[in-house]
Amino acid sequence: MRHQLGYDDIKAAAERIAGHVRPVAVAPAEGLGDTGSTEGAELWLALEYLQHTGSFKARGAQNFLRAHREAGTLPYAGVTIASGGNAGLACAWAALRQGVRATVFLPANAPQVKIARLRSYGADVRLVGTEYAEALAACEEFAASSGALASHAYDHPLIAAGAGTLMEEIHARVPGLDTVLVAVGGGGLFAGVATAARQHGIRAVAVEPEHSRALHSALSAGRPVDVTVDSVAGDSLGARRATALAVDAARPEGDVTGARSVLVPDEAIVRARRELWEDRRILVEHGAATAFAALLTDNGADSADGTYGYRPADGEKVCVILCGANTDPATLSTSPAPH
């Protein structure tokens, strides 16, 4: 039977990783994204890109490995994972902290900055194919033949629960929060954040690139389905299938705090990333900028295939999670320009 992610899982994760991850910093975002669509709202940024290894993934990796250490199920062969980069970095970092080996499978087109950092953590890096799904298949084969413990970039309750600890910290730091905007790839972060957010009466909004919409498509189909990935944020939000944990967490609850799913075009993602840099000197990945892009998109507009962007209500208190910064600064000038 598939494990249902619950708030108790997130509380247990918070206790398990306390003192082993950096508490999130939050900052007011007055004037940022001021296009008229956010007028009257109170905006905050959760600066999770300052986390160990440069992304929120450190939380899930710590929870996963520490839980297995507690249970005595960390094998001599170590741990293995397939990743677009950030989950591999977090897994390798956490494995180094636990004194076990990490073998990380990445698509061959993964950013060089992530590959170099992985090797700096002592990971055995193996490049396979051009998509996450191909790296995952190779990782699963390696785990079966070597006896290594198979972790996952997002599709595991311990990983999602670890990610959900971020929402606990945001809730403590931003009293009266109404809404949190979360970028979604495979959905591990969203599953954890939405589960914790619902506990506190906070709306979680899943934000995906319009051409990398694994969760949005799963919600339309009523189950996880494969999608085509073609986005500027594909290196970190390029999962072809969302985790069922995220689908469960995103199901409407029939109240105003129920989770929502919205889409954003690549042009808005590029613009969001540049605006964060030019206005705040915050340099994040395209994937992390995707959450902020929801506020820069034709907010709340509906189309035949979904809702685009998010328009806060007057007086609404909104927090945007900036979840990762493993990126090459040179791409600020080489990314496709907004139309």
Image (cartoon, rainbow, N blue to C red):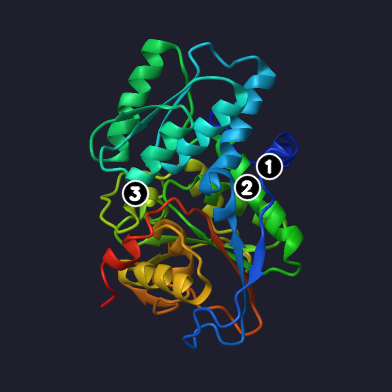
Q: Position of residue 139 (x, y in %)?
A: 36, 25
Give amino acid for label 1.
Ile
**Amino acid at pointer 2:** Gly
Q: Is residue 240 visible?
A: no
SS at badge 2:
helix
Query: Percent from the top left, x then y, of residue 54?
Result: 52, 48
Q: Determine whether 190 is above or below 335 in the image.
A: above
Q: Which mark is residue 164?
A: 2
Q: Is residue 50 something one can see in this rendering?
A: yes
Q: Is residue 7 left or right of residue 206?
A: right
**What residue sits 72% from the left and 66% below the top?**
174
Residue 330: mark in rendering: none
Do callouts 2 and 1 mark residues in contact (Cβ within 8 Å)?
yes
Residues under numbered marks 3 and 2 in contact, where contact means CB atoms less than 8 Å apart: no
Residue drawn at (56%, 78%), measured in percent from left and top? 312
- Considering only order in the chain, which callout, 2 or 3, is on the residue closer to the N terminus? 2
| Label 2, label 1: how far apart the Cα atoms are | 6 Å
Dot 1: element: helix
Q: CA distance from mark 1 to mark 3?
A: 27 Å
Q: Which residue is mark 1?
A: 10
Q: Nearer the viewer, residue 193 or 201?
A: 193
Q: Nearer the viewer, mark 1 or mark 3?
A: 3
Which residue type carries mark 3? Answer: Asp
Residue positioned 45% across, 54% down in the render: 184
Quick one: label 2 or label 1, which is nearer the N terminus?
1
Determine whether 238 is above or below 329 in the image. above
Residue 10: % across, % down: 68, 42
**Label whose residue precedes the other's in the sequence (1 or 3):** 1
Is there a contact, CB below 8 Å, between mark 1 and mark 3? no
Which residue is depicted at the point 59% across and 37% down?
4
Q: Could you say which disc has been placed on residue 235 in the image?
A: 3
Which is nearer the eye, 64 or 6?
A: 64
